[in-house]
Image (tube, grey):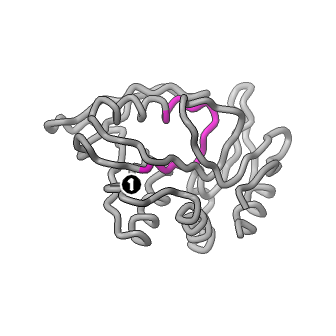
Amino acid sequence: MLERLIASLETCPLVKRGEYNYFIHPITDGVPEVDPHLLREVCMAMIKVLDLDGVDRILAAEAMGIPIGAVLALATDLPMNIVRKREYRIPGEVAVHQATGYSKGQLFLNGVKRGDRVVIVDDVISTGGTTRALLWALDKAGAEVQDICFVIKRGSADIGRPYKTLVSVEVTDRVRVVDRIF
Protein backbone atom coordinates (compact mmCIF):
# COMPACT_ATOMS: atom_id res chain seq x y z
CA MET A 1 0.00 0.00 0.00
CA LEU A 2 1.05 3.63 -0.64
CA GLU A 3 3.20 2.71 -3.64
CA ARG A 4 1.59 5.39 -5.84
CA LEU A 5 2.04 8.02 -3.14
CA ILE A 6 5.69 7.16 -2.54
CA ALA A 7 6.58 6.97 -6.24
CA SER A 8 4.82 10.27 -6.96
CA LEU A 9 6.55 12.02 -4.05
CA GLU A 10 10.00 10.78 -4.97
CA THR A 11 9.63 12.09 -8.53
CA CYS A 12 7.80 15.38 -7.91
CA PRO A 13 9.38 18.74 -8.82
CA LEU A 14 10.77 21.26 -6.32
CA VAL A 15 10.68 25.05 -6.43
CA LYS A 16 12.57 27.47 -4.25
CA ARG A 17 10.55 29.96 -2.15
CA GLY A 18 13.23 32.02 -0.48
CA GLU A 19 15.32 29.48 1.41
CA TYR A 20 12.46 26.96 1.46
CA ASN A 21 12.49 24.01 -0.96
CA TYR A 22 8.79 23.58 -1.74
CA PHE A 23 7.69 20.32 -3.35
CA ILE A 24 4.89 20.41 -5.93
CA HIS A 25 2.64 17.37 -5.66
CA PRO A 26 -0.94 16.42 -6.60
CA ILE A 27 -1.95 15.81 -2.96
CA THR A 28 -0.42 19.04 -1.62
CA ASP A 29 -1.06 21.34 -4.58
CA GLY A 30 -3.44 19.66 -7.04
CA VAL A 31 -0.70 20.08 -9.66
CA PRO A 32 -0.19 18.89 -12.33
CA GLU A 33 -3.38 16.83 -11.81
CA VAL A 34 -5.00 14.82 -9.05
CA ASP A 35 -4.91 11.17 -10.04
CA PRO A 36 -8.07 9.47 -8.71
CA HIS A 37 -6.11 6.26 -8.03
CA LEU A 38 -3.61 8.19 -5.89
CA LEU A 39 -6.38 9.98 -4.00
CA ARG A 40 -8.21 6.70 -3.41
CA GLU A 41 -5.01 5.03 -2.17
CA VAL A 42 -4.41 7.88 0.29
CA CYS A 43 -7.99 7.88 1.59
CA MET A 44 -8.20 4.10 1.97
CA ALA A 45 -4.97 4.22 4.00
CA MET A 46 -6.43 6.99 6.17
CA ILE A 47 -9.54 4.93 6.82
CA LYS A 48 -7.31 2.10 8.05
CA VAL A 49 -5.39 4.31 10.52
CA LEU A 50 -8.02 6.78 11.74
CA ASP A 51 -10.14 6.08 14.81
CA LEU A 52 -13.58 6.75 13.32
CA ASP A 53 -15.61 5.05 16.05
CA GLY A 54 -18.37 7.43 17.13
CA VAL A 55 -17.10 10.32 14.99
CA ASP A 56 -19.71 12.90 13.98
CA ARG A 57 -17.81 14.68 11.23
CA ILE A 58 -14.63 15.04 9.21
CA LEU A 59 -12.87 18.40 9.35
CA ALA A 60 -10.68 19.46 6.42
CA ALA A 61 -8.85 22.73 5.90
CA GLU A 62 -9.02 24.66 2.65
CA ALA A 63 -7.54 24.10 0.16
CA MET A 64 -5.90 20.71 -0.22
CA GLY A 65 -7.63 19.06 2.71
CA ILE A 66 -10.86 19.35 0.69
CA PRO A 67 -10.30 16.53 -1.83
CA ILE A 68 -9.05 14.23 0.93
CA GLY A 69 -11.98 15.05 3.19
CA ALA A 70 -14.48 14.69 0.34
CA VAL A 71 -13.31 11.21 -0.61
CA LEU A 72 -13.28 10.19 3.07
CA ALA A 73 -16.81 11.54 3.52
CA LEU A 74 -18.02 9.53 0.53
CA ALA A 75 -16.29 6.37 1.74
CA THR A 76 -17.47 6.65 5.37
CA ASP A 77 -20.84 8.44 5.01
CA LEU A 78 -19.62 11.04 7.53
CA PRO A 79 -20.37 14.72 6.89
CA MET A 80 -17.43 16.98 6.15
CA ASN A 81 -16.85 20.52 7.38
CA ILE A 82 -14.40 22.69 5.50
CA VAL A 83 -12.39 25.27 7.39
CA ARG A 84 -12.56 28.09 4.86
CA LYS A 85 -10.37 31.06 4.01
CA ARG A 86 -13.49 33.22 3.68
CA GLU A 87 -15.50 34.75 6.49
CA TYR A 88 -19.26 34.14 6.34
CA ARG A 89 -20.31 35.88 9.59
CA ILE A 90 -22.89 33.25 10.44
CA PRO A 91 -23.74 32.40 14.06
CA GLY A 92 -21.11 30.22 15.73
CA GLU A 93 -18.34 31.04 13.26
CA VAL A 94 -14.87 30.85 14.83
CA ALA A 95 -11.96 32.82 13.32
CA VAL A 96 -8.78 30.76 13.15
CA HIS A 97 -5.50 32.71 12.98
CA GLN A 98 -2.89 30.54 11.31
CA ALA A 99 0.84 30.89 10.75
CA THR A 100 2.84 28.29 8.85
CA GLY A 101 6.45 28.11 7.77
CA TYR A 102 5.70 30.05 4.60
CA SER A 103 2.44 31.95 5.10
CA LYS A 104 0.08 33.66 7.53
CA GLY A 105 -3.64 34.05 7.24
CA GLN A 106 -7.04 33.54 8.69
CA LEU A 107 -9.40 30.60 8.38
CA PHE A 108 -13.00 30.29 9.53
CA LEU A 109 -14.64 27.31 11.23
CA ASN A 110 -18.39 26.86 10.77
CA GLY A 111 -20.95 24.17 11.50
CA VAL A 112 -19.14 22.40 14.34
CA LYS A 113 -21.22 22.20 17.49
CA ARG A 114 -20.44 21.69 21.17
CA GLY A 115 -19.97 17.96 21.81
CA ASP A 116 -19.21 17.04 18.19
CA ARG A 117 -16.53 14.37 17.81
CA VAL A 118 -14.33 15.17 14.83
CA VAL A 119 -11.34 13.87 12.95
CA ILE A 120 -9.01 16.32 11.24
CA VAL A 121 -7.50 15.37 7.90
CA ASP A 122 -5.07 17.39 5.84
CA ASP A 123 -2.48 17.03 3.13
CA VAL A 124 0.77 17.93 4.89
CA ILE A 125 2.14 18.96 8.26
CA SER A 126 5.42 20.83 8.42
CA THR A 127 5.34 23.46 11.16
CA GLY A 128 1.99 22.51 12.70
CA GLY A 129 0.79 26.12 12.68
CA THR A 130 -2.50 25.46 10.90
CA THR A 131 -3.34 22.45 13.04
CA ARG A 132 -2.55 24.19 16.33
CA ALA A 133 -4.91 26.99 15.26
CA LEU A 134 -7.62 24.46 14.31
CA LEU A 135 -7.27 22.69 17.66
CA TRP A 136 -7.73 26.03 19.43
CA ALA A 137 -10.85 26.80 17.36
CA LEU A 138 -12.36 23.37 17.94
CA ASP A 139 -11.75 23.71 21.67
CA LYS A 140 -13.47 27.12 21.58
CA ALA A 141 -16.41 25.55 19.72
CA GLY A 142 -16.63 22.79 22.35
CA ALA A 143 -15.82 19.94 19.96
CA GLU A 144 -13.75 16.87 20.78
CA VAL A 145 -10.92 15.94 18.41
CA GLN A 146 -10.88 12.16 18.25
CA ASP A 147 -8.04 11.73 15.76
CA ILE A 148 -5.81 13.60 13.31
CA CYS A 149 -4.17 12.27 10.16
CA PHE A 150 -1.95 13.91 7.57
CA VAL A 151 -0.88 12.38 4.29
CA ILE A 152 2.66 13.78 4.50
CA LYS A 153 4.88 14.87 7.36
CA ARG A 154 7.79 17.18 6.63
CA GLY A 155 9.95 18.01 9.64
CA SER A 156 9.07 17.38 13.26
CA ALA A 157 6.00 19.47 14.03
CA ASP A 158 4.67 19.43 17.58
CA ILE A 159 0.96 20.23 17.84
CA GLY A 160 0.64 19.36 21.51
CA ARG A 161 -1.06 16.02 20.95
CA PRO A 162 -0.51 12.79 18.99
CA TYR A 163 -1.28 12.61 15.30
CA LYS A 164 -0.81 10.14 12.46
CA THR A 165 0.92 10.50 9.12
CA LEU A 166 0.97 8.14 6.16
CA VAL A 167 4.52 9.06 5.13
CA SER A 168 7.34 11.26 6.37
CA VAL A 169 9.59 13.01 3.88
CA GLU A 170 12.94 14.71 3.82
CA VAL A 171 13.38 17.47 1.26
CA THR A 172 16.82 18.42 -0.01
CA ASP A 173 17.44 18.69 -3.74
CA ARG A 174 14.65 16.09 -4.06
CA VAL A 175 11.93 14.48 -1.96
CA ARG A 176 12.81 11.27 -0.17
CA VAL A 177 10.29 9.20 1.80
CA VAL A 178 12.01 8.33 5.09
CA ASP A 179 9.15 6.64 6.94
CA ARG A 180 5.74 5.18 6.18
CA ILE A 181 2.86 3.89 8.25
CA PHE A 182 2.72 0.61 6.26
- Expressed as whole percent of the image width and height from the top left, the position of residue 115 reads 26, 43
| Residue that carries the numbered disc 1 in the rendered image | 58
Horizontal side of residue 156 vs 138, given as left or right: right
Viewer-side residue, 39 vs 16: 39
Viewer-side residue, 75 vs 22: 75
Horizontal side of residue 157 vs 173, given as left or right: left
Give the residue at x 65% y 49%: 152
Q: Quadrant of the N terminus?
A: bottom right
- Expressed as whole percent of the image width and height from the top left, the position of residue 46 reads 56, 61
- Expressed as whole percent of the image width and height from the top left, the position of residue 127 reads 61, 30
Element assignment for label 1: strand
* Residue 24, magenta (yes or no): no
* Residue 126, magenta (yes or no): yes
**Is residue 43 positioned above or below 22 on the image?**
below
What's the amino acid at mark 1? Ile
Horizontal side of residue 40 vs 89, given as left or right: right
**Is residue 182 positioned above or below 88 on the image?**
below
Q: Quadrant of the C terminus?
A: bottom right
The residue segment tinted magenta is: 119-131
Give the residue at x 60% y 45%: 124
Question: Which residue is situated farthest in the front direction here?
Answer: 53
- Expressed as whole percent of the image width and height from the top left, the position of residue 129 reads 53, 29
Give the residue at x 23% y 43%: 113
